[in-house]
Image (spheres, helix red, strand yellow):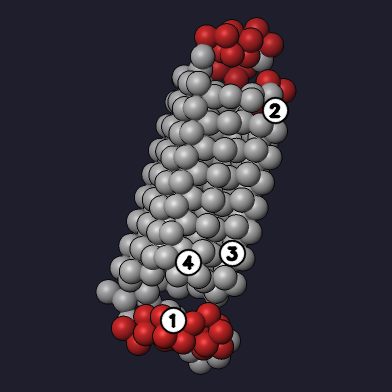
Amino acid sequence: MANPEHVKLLIDGGVQEWNKFRGNSQSPQPDLSGADLSGYDFTSLNLSHANLEGVDLSDAYLYRANLTEANLTRANFTEADILEANFIKANLSFATMVGADLTGTGLIACNLEGANFEGANLTQASLPWGNLAGANLSKTKLKLTDLREAKLILANLQGASFQDTSFTGAILQEANLLGVTHVDIDLLAKAKTLYQSQLDPELKDQLLKDHPHLFEQPEA
């Protein structure tokens, strides 16, 4: 459960008072777990290292917010605007990001296992070295998105737009890539593996012809 004093300070004091509180080296680690923070404007809010497990931030505005290394397990960001925010090394396992706008946001080395990004906008977002095993990225916009060395085992990318997406070293084993659009073959071919992934026949045939190694079973 959230610390009620922390919730009151954030809601009543706003971003300025909250960030002043966070700037105090003696302040305790914030606990906002399970709190309903939906719909608020949290521009530039400092939530780094905070316990936000199960928090509701749906429809919130988090422009340039700092959530570095925060615990966001099962957090709800449905339809939130999270532009140019910082989630470096945050735990977003099983979080809901349906329809969220994450343009330009840094999700470097995050735990995104089982997260639901259906229909989200990840244009120019950075997700290198992230764990997206079992994540739902269906119908996402991945224009200029950085997925270098991301772990996408069993991820669902059906219907996603891959315009200029970076897949260098990405693990797409058993991933669903049916119906993907704006695919650059050369960029997708830089993935580490597509072993047992689902692909539209034409795309799969082209990759098998020019890059058959992608479909070989990876070494344990």
Q: Is residue 202 above or below residue 95?
A: above
Local crowd at mark 1 within 10 Å, few (<14), some, or many (≥20)? Answer: many
Q: Position of residue 61 (x, y in %)?
A: 51, 64
Asked where in the image residue 51 lies, by quadrant, the reply is: bottom left
Q: Is residue 40 above or below residue 74?
A: below
| Furthest residue in direction right, as rendered | 186
Q: Nearer the viewer, mark 2 or mark 3?
A: 3
Spatial separation of the CA atoms under disc 2 and disc 4: 32 Å
The mark nearer the N terminus, 3 or 4, is 3
- Determine the CA span between mark 3 and mark 4: 16 Å
What residue is drawn where x is 50% and y is 60%?
A: 90
C-alpha separation, residue under disc 1 versus residue under disc 3:
16 Å
Q: Earlier in the sequence, mark 2 or mark 4?
A: 4
Separation (CA) of disc 2 from disc 3: 30 Å
Q: Could you say whether the residue bearing mark 4 is in a helix, strand or loop? A: loop
x, y percent for residue 192 = 61, 29
Mark with earlier residue (4, 1)? 1
Helix, strand or loop for disc 2: helix
- Give the class, few, some or many, for how many residues have Cα within 10 Å of label 2's Cα (few <14, many ≥20): some
Q: Please name the amino acid that badge 2 sits on.
A: Leu
Of labels 4 and 1, the one closer to you: 1
Q: Which residue is mark 2?
A: 187
- Alpha carbon distance from label 4 to label 1: 16 Å
Badge 1 amino acid: Leu
Question: In the rendered image, which residue does mark 1 sit on?
Answer: 10
What SS does tag 3 mark? loop
Which mark is drawn over residue 70?
4
Q: What residue did someone put label 3 on?
A: 63
Q: Is residue 50 visible?
A: yes
Q: Nearer the viewer, mark 3 or mark 4?
A: 3
Residue drawn at 66 percent across, 15 percent down: 211
Viewer-side label of 2, 1: 1
